[in-house]
Image (spheres, helix red, strand yellow):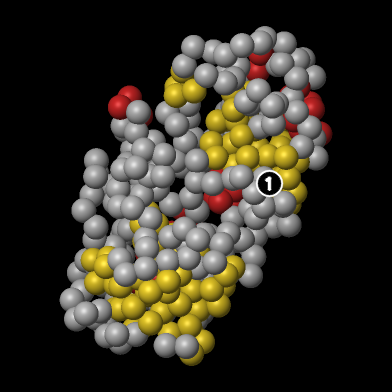
Amino acid sequence: MTERALRVVRAGALTSVQDEGRHGHAHLGVPRSGALDLPASRLANRLVGNAQGAAVLETTLNGCAVRAGCAVTVAVTGAPCAVTVDGRPAAWGAPVRLAPGALVSVGSPVRGVRSYLAFAGGIAVEPVLGSRSTDLLSGLGPAPLREGTVVPLGRPGVPGRRVDWVPAPGVPDELVLRVRPGPRADWFAPDAPAALAAGRYRVSSQSNRIGLRTEGPPLRRVVEGELPSEGMVLGAVQVPPDGRPVVFLADHPTTGGYPVIGVVPAPDLAAAAQAVPGARLRFVLTHWD
C-alpha cells in the first residue's frame, strides 16, 4: 500500500470515522452524530494542523491499530492510553511523524472510554449529508472499521504545532451532569426532580453512542402511557418505562414517545463520552439562562 491512505490492522471493539456531525437534518429523522468528545477531537486536529472539523478516528474501550500508506503526522487525544509506532512507545497528546508503512497502535485507555486519532489532511471518506461521521442509529456514513479496511486520507495543510503540554481535562471518578428541567417534568411525581438529584446512579454497561444508560433508583411517574412521538434533542434525559434515566448522545433518535424530565447542556456531554461502565453519576438541577 503506497497510496495516501490507512489500512486497518486491528479494529478494536468499535472504531468509527467521526467529525463534527451532520447538523440541520433532524426534520428528516437524521441524528447529528459526530465525535462524542468534541474537545478531544478538536485538539487532535489542531495538533496535526487540520481544521477543527476534520474527520478523525474514534476508538472505544480497547483502541485500534492502523498502518500508514504514506508519510503522515498523527496525534492521539481523548482517553489517555499507550501509543506505539512499530512497537516502540510514542507520545500521546502530541504530533508524531509516521514513515510510509509504519504501524501506529493505540491501546486500552488508562482512564476513560474513547480515544481520538487525527491524521494530517483528515480522514477523506465520502461525505453524506455534509458529514463524514459514522451514525450507528441511521446507518449513514462509513461502516465501523474492520480489519483490512482501507481509509483514504486528505491532503495536509499547515504542519502541526509543537506543544509542551496538552490542556486536556482528566476523567473524573464521578460524572456530574447538570440537568435543566422540562419539557415533560409534569409527567413525573412532584418529588421526581429531587429524587433525580439525590439518586445514587451509575453508568450502565448498556451505554453506547446513542445514549448513556443508568443504573439506580427509578423515577416515579404520575402520567402513564406514552406521548405522541415528539422531537428529541441532544442531551435529553428520557425516562423509559423502567424509570431509569437515559441521557441522549450524538447518535440519539430525533423523535421519541417516552417523557423527557430534563436536558443536559451540550458542554457536559464530553465528560459523559468518557464515563466508564460502573462509574458514579450525579445529576445537578439547574435552570435555563
Q: Where is 42 relative to 166, above or below?
A: above
Would residue 60 be visible to someone looking at this image?
yes
Would residue 262 be visible to someone looking at this image?
no
Number of marks present in the image shown:
1
Residue 9 horizontal side relative to residue 153, left or right: right
**Residue 138 in the image: x percent, y percent?**
36, 38
Q: Badge 1: how crowded within 10 Å, few (<14), some, or many (20+)?
A: many
**Residue 125 in the image: x percent, y percent?**
24, 57
Quarter holding the C terminus is top right
Residue situated in front as seen by the camera: 223 or 234: 223
Residue depicted at 47% across the width and 58% down the height: 14
Residue depicted at 44% across the width and 24% down the height: 255
- Label 1 element class: strand
Q: Where is 134 relative to 98, above or below?
A: above
**Residue, disc 1:** 203
**Residue 261 in the image: x percent, y percent?**
63, 23
Residue depicted at 24% across the width and 45% down the height: 128
Quarter holding the N terminus is bottom left
**Which quarter of the picture shows residue 44?**
bottom left
**Residue 104 in the image: x percent, y percent?**
41, 79
Residue 270 horizontal side relative to residue 195, left or right: left
Residue depicted at 45% across the width and 77% down the height: 105
Residue situated in front as seen by the camera: 51 or 77: 77
Q: Where is 40 relative to 285, above or below?
A: below
Q: Amino acid at mark 1?
A: Val
Residue 127 horizontal side relative to residue 175, left or right: left
